[in-house]
């Protein structure tokens, strides 16, 4: 029976993102929401700064009183404002972040004056223009301003901004429950007890780590034997989760049993195979009934293929479930530091290392070579039928972390 042609990358991504499981709304303390995505726009409840503040250490004076000398009548420190107002010929010692005294609209830097007892006078050419060293009311934001959009990931800076804007709690979407199933008779559960005909079961740990970094709840099952009965039991154990990621068994070999297993348990195949290298045998299905609607993503068993397809497909779908406004991975343009050969009809993602200036592709391209993946921090995107590229040519790359500046 003829199979439909493999899907292009963007179509497969869009179809999988559209299947992202709907998650419920939950309200969390801001500090507990680190790494989560805002479910609603966040408007400021207060103005920041709430009043004019000094941006430097120095002396607050009136702008119509530039000449000096001035008599120091008090001090305004952060959290301890000067209670009075300024008249001509008067100054207030002021610290960075301190409230500007009433009628003061100029800060003279402490290095531009000389003080003797309670008298200060200029030692330079004159004070800076009025307002230069003042943080005006509402400089950062005003009450009612939208400070963060729905779908924004809450990193350390966003956490600080939400709190500064007067929020003790934020609304986010609940974490998808993810199960990673590692399958294959060749897999050894313990890396220190691995026979010559076996390989350590590393894919499950890799995928679980990738999912955990998004903030999902994840657990592992496996390694699972290459039998329909073992795989059906694994899927039954995973029935309470929202998303199942499998590694291995998604191709068409005699021992690739993920698809027959899905058919046996009543799952509906959404699509199978994508036009990329590595990672062609990607499988996506849904399972309804006897539990929550479940999204099943069958990833290839070769570790690099498993990583690449998880990065390009599974993680964007999970980001969408978490409420990310932009769930797809972001790319950038880099300059090649070494040549690349022409490629065939499938889009390729080549492992590479970007040093902040140029990117060099890894010499070892085998989809089972984990050392070259661990030494890479980008995937070089090579569109289908790309001609040979020379050092100095520009290419599009996807940062994948791991090592170095990316």
Image (tube, helix red, strand yellow):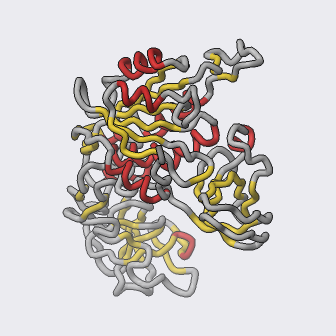
Left or right of 284 in this view: 404: right
User: Would you say residue 217 is visible in this rendering?
Assistant: no
Q: Position of residue 208 (x, y in %)?
A: 51, 31
Which of the two residues, 110 or 268, is positioned nearer the viewer here? 268
Who's the residue at 59% across and 54% down the image? 399
Q: Position of residue 186 (x, y in %)?
A: 65, 21
Which of the two residues, 280 or 105, is positioned nearer the viewer here? 280
Who's the residue at 44% across and 73% down the image? 133
Which of the two residues, 49 or 350, is positioned nearer the viewer here? 350
Left or right of 138 in this view: 368: right
Task: Give the residue at the far top of this rendering.
Answer: 193
* Quarter of the rendering occupied by the C terminus: bottom right
Total numbered labels placed on residues in the image: 0
Q: Position of residue 371 (x, y in %)?
A: 74, 39
Task: Give the residue at the far front of this rendering.
Answer: 1
Who's the residue at 74% across and 56% down the image? 361
71 over 376 or under it: above or below? below
Q: Position of residue 32 (x, y in %)?
A: 35, 36
212 over 229 or under it: above or below? below
User: Would you say residue 379 is visible in this rendering?
Assistant: yes
Left or right of 244 in this view: 305: right
Who's the residue at 35% across and 40% down the image? 33
């Amino acid at each position: 029976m003829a199979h439909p042609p493999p899907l292009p990358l963007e179509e497969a991504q869009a179809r999988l993102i559209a299947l992202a499981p709907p998650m419920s709304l939950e309200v969390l303390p801001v500090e507990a929401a680190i790494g989560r995505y805002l479910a609603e726009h966040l408007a400021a409840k207060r103005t920041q700064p709430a009043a004019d503040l000094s941006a430097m250490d120095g002396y607050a004076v009136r702008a119509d009183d530039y000449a000096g000398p001035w008599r120091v009548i008090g001090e305004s420190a952060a959290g301890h404002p000067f209670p009075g107002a300024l008249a001509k010929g008067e100054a207030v010692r002021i610290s960075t972040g301190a409230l500007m005294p009433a009628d003061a609209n100029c800060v003279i830097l402490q290095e531009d004056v000389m003080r003797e007892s309670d008298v200060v006078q200029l030692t330079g050419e004159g004070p800076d223009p009025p307002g230069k060293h003042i943080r005006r009311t509402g400089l950062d934001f005003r009450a009612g301003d939208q400070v963060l959009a729905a779908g924004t990931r809450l990193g350390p800076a966003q956490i600080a901004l939400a709190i500064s804007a007067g929020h003790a709690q934020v609304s986010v979407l609940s974490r998808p429950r993810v199960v990673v199933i590692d399958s294959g008779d060749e897999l050894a559960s313990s890396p220190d007890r691995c026979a010559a005909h076996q390989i350590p079961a590393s894919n499950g740990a890799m995928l679980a780590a990738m999912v955990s970094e998004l903030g999902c709840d994840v657990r592992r099952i496996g390694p699972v034997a290459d039998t329909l009965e073992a795989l059906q039991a694994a899927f039954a154990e995973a029935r309470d989760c929202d998303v199942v990621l499998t590694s291995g068994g998604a191709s068409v070999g005699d021992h690739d049993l993920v698809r027959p297993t899905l058919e046996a348990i009543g799952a509906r195949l959404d699509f199978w195979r994508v036009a990329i290298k590595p990672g062609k045998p990607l499988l996506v299905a849904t399972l309804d009934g006897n539990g929550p609607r479940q999204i099943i993503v069958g990833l290839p068993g070769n570790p690099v293929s498993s990583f690449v397809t998880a990065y390009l497909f599974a993680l964007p779908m999970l980001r969408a479930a978490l409420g990310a406004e932009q769930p797809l991975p972001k790319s950038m343009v880099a300059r090649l530091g070494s040549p690349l050969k022409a490629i065939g009809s499938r889009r390729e993602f080549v492992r590479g290392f970007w040093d902040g200036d140029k990117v060099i592709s890894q010499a070892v391209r085998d989809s089972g070579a984990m050392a070259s993946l661990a030494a890479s921090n980008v995937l070089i995107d090579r569109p289908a039928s790309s001609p040979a590229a020379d050092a100095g040519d520009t290419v599009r790359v996807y940062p994948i972390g791991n090592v170095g500046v990316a």
